[in-house]
Image: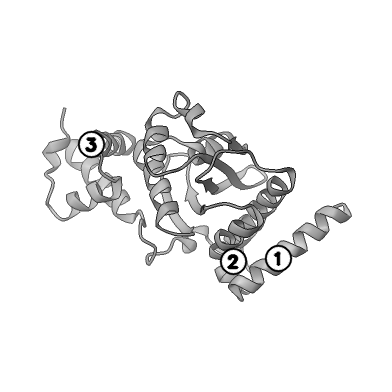
Amino acid sequence: MDEQRRERLWQLVAALIEHAGERPEWVRAVCEVAAGEVHADAAVISLRTAGRAQDLVAASGDWAESLEELQYTVGDGPAVEAFTTGEPVLVDDLTSGEGRWPGFADGAAETGAAAAFAFPLQTGAVRLGTLGLYRHRPGSLSPEELANALTLADLSTTALLTDSSGAISPVANWAREDVPGHYDDVHIATGMLATQLQISLADALLRLRAHAFSRHLPLIGVARAVLNRELRLDSFTD
């Protein structure tokens, strides 16, 4: 590691320690540090799987959560692409992404999002999730901001894999039930729908997403309506 990268790493570690105090809070602190070091208006970290399952780990606020929820509902967007490809996705003007992510771009614009930058959280061939950064104004990241974002993504990956004692821990433990937008209800509703309709989990999730998108509802709200028996399962039949 060259001297400049080492200095940047320790500066960001110092900032994380200042915000978090303890390593279990490092993932949440990344969202706060990103605002100052990358000049992001919103930051969010999610765990993801190849099957598009997702859990919100930390977010800088309601706006960040809503952008992550939007991507979960429609199944596309910068963070989804970053996880799928394993490469950073840097979009300095989201209006240019209308054809790229038709389900995401319009909804994001309605919330005031103008630029998006997403980074995969990965180590070797193992991909854990994504760090998403958003701005109200269009414009690219400066070289220094990009370097800081990449370093924060690396630090997030380490935090997800390591507990406070330094031992390897299951990343699922980072999914926080106290964070609005926690997606366990979606997983359970998907399983119920798959069993009832005798379809695959992937098809069940697709039907939940289609229902949510066509009615401009958050996916988690549709799932909770299913679990609370407020929405009949036969509403999802062909």
Q: Identify the residue under disc 3.
A: 211
**Depth check, front residue: 131 or 116:** 116
| Residue type marked 2 | Trp
Specify the amino acid type for callout 3: His
From what the image shows, is residue 128 above or below residue 57?
Answer: above
**Mark 2 residue crowding within 10 angstroms, few (<14) / some (14–19) / many (20+):** many
Residue visible at 60% across and 57% down? 34
Q: Name the residue under label 2.
A: 26
Percent position (x, y) of residue 131?
56, 49
Mark nearer the N terminus (3 vs 2): 2
Mark number for residue 13? Answer: 1
**Residue 142 picture location, percent across and down:** 70, 43
**Earlier residue among tags 1 and 3:** 1
Q: Quadrant of the C terminus?
A: top left
Q: Do the residues labelled 3 and 2 touch (CB within 8 Å)?
A: no
Labelled pair 1, 3 in contact (Cβ < 8 Å): no
Q: Is residue 160 left or right of residue 17?
A: left
Q: Position of residue 15 (x, y in %)?
A: 67, 67
Dot 1 or dot 2: first in sequence order is: 1
